[in-house]
Amino acid sequence: MTRTNSLRLRALGAASALALAFSGTAHAQDTLKIGVPTAMSGTYADLGNQAKRAVEFAVAEANAKGGVAGHKVEIKILDTEAKPDLARKQSERLALEGYKVLTGIIASGEALAIAPMLDRWDALYVATVTKSDKITGDSCVRRAFRVNHQDAQDAAVVKPWLAGRKEQKWAVIGMDGAWGRGSGAGFKEAAAAHGKTVVAELYPPLGATDYAAYIQQIKASGAEGLWVALAGRDAVSFATQARQFGLLDSVFTAGVSFVTDNTVQAMGETAKGIHGIINYSSTLDTPENRSFAAAWAKHFNGDQPSNFEGETYLGMQVIFQAVEKARSVKPIDIARAMSGGSFDTILGRLAFRPEDNQLVLPNYFGHVAEAGGKLRPVVTMSFPADQATPPPSGACKLAKL
């Protein structure tokens, strides 16, 4: 080899190394864009605003530390009004604008509407609020993951709780949708396992304002206990009217998403004594949760994170750690890092089941009582993850990532 050729090769090698260095820098500087299609108006507006606060808090926290694995984090929020068709439209708009990591959806029907489109959009969806079993069941897709509790996980803790209840006849009222009916079905199965009877099942439409007819049907059914699967404005409206008609004084009442922090605050004294599933509480005693609750209180003038804020923050923790593991902000790479992976969260180290992309979680039960000078959901029963999460149903058939 001539000296000239040798020098030329060295120059080419140096240029290649420089190009690779710039390429790596550019890659590290790619922005992690997170889209938040959520309910900013309508019946679930309060829930959507809770999801929004949690996402914004997590992003500000990450960016203050230099981003996620060197990636700045940006978010864009669009209102879905909790309507499936609008959720699909807004999610597509976000994905086309580059916000391909989607989270914050409130209603299960919305999640079921966008899931089939994720591959086409080259997007990823992380559920933090939606509960329908179908999302990680027969409607599962490889790019959808759930970090919050599905209906089956809630039903798993209802069974041991019901064993200690004396009421034999129960009524169910839930929103007329995938979540409400799924919760009702889960409660009915749990009741049957203990020889209890569901004597009435009622499913008012989302956004109902007059519950008088439903309340009368519950009273006429002879139910001794009532299971409620209503959230947001629906929960407040029903509880207020049920108290006015004397239903809460004559029928033992419990539910899911019915005694969350913000709902209890809106209900006031009406909520006192109501029992229910508590999926997350700022009082949960893990080092990670204590640290999170303290940072949240400092940022929000002493307020504590609510149920949906805690769950959504947990989802952001998982997304950020998956980006770090993947060393990429591409949705398919993040999905591969999530599949079957374990993550450090405010509830401890938790893992996704590879069979259905459901996070295996602990769960809690409690009631509304005075605590720290105000009414709030108070945990009275705790269930470890292995007890609170039943095995996969087998309905999910995931395509390979």
Image (spheres, helix red, strand yellow):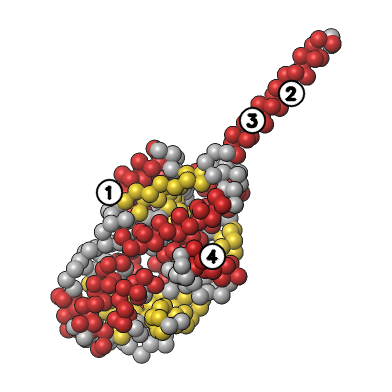
Q: Quadrant of residue 206?
A: bottom left
Establish if 212 lies above or below 356.
Answer: below
Alpha carbon of mark 4 to alpha carbon of mark 2: how far? Answer: 47 Å
**Among the two numbered marks 1 and 3 on one chain, the one whose residue lies closer to the N terminus:** 3
Q: Quadrant of residue 384?
A: bottom right
Please name which of the two marks, 1 or 2, marks the residue nearer to the observer. Answer: 2
Establish if 335 lies above or below 348.
Answer: above
Q: Could you tell me which secondary element the residue under label 4 belongs to?
A: helix
Say whether marks 4 and 3 touch (CB < 8 Å). no
In depth, the one of 83 and 385 nearer the eye is: 83
**Among the two numbered marks 4 and 3 on one chain, the one whose residue lies closer to the N terminus:** 3
In the image, what residue type sits under mark 4? Ala
Q: Position of residue 307 (x, y in %)?
A: 43, 68
Q: Quadrant of residue 152?
A: bottom left
In depth, the one of 39 and 148 nearer the eye is: 39
Query: Which residue is labeled 2 in the image?
Result: 14
Q: Position of residue 50 (x, y in %)?
A: 39, 62
Q: Is residue 327 visible?
A: yes
Give residue 152's mark.
none
Residue at 50 percent across and 52 percent down: it is 59
In the image, what residue type sits under mark 2? Ala
Query: Which residue is labeled 4 in the image?
Result: 295
Residue at 79 percent across and 11 percent down: it is 5
Residue at 40 percent across and 38 percent down: it is 97
Establish if 117 lies above or below 41.
Answer: above
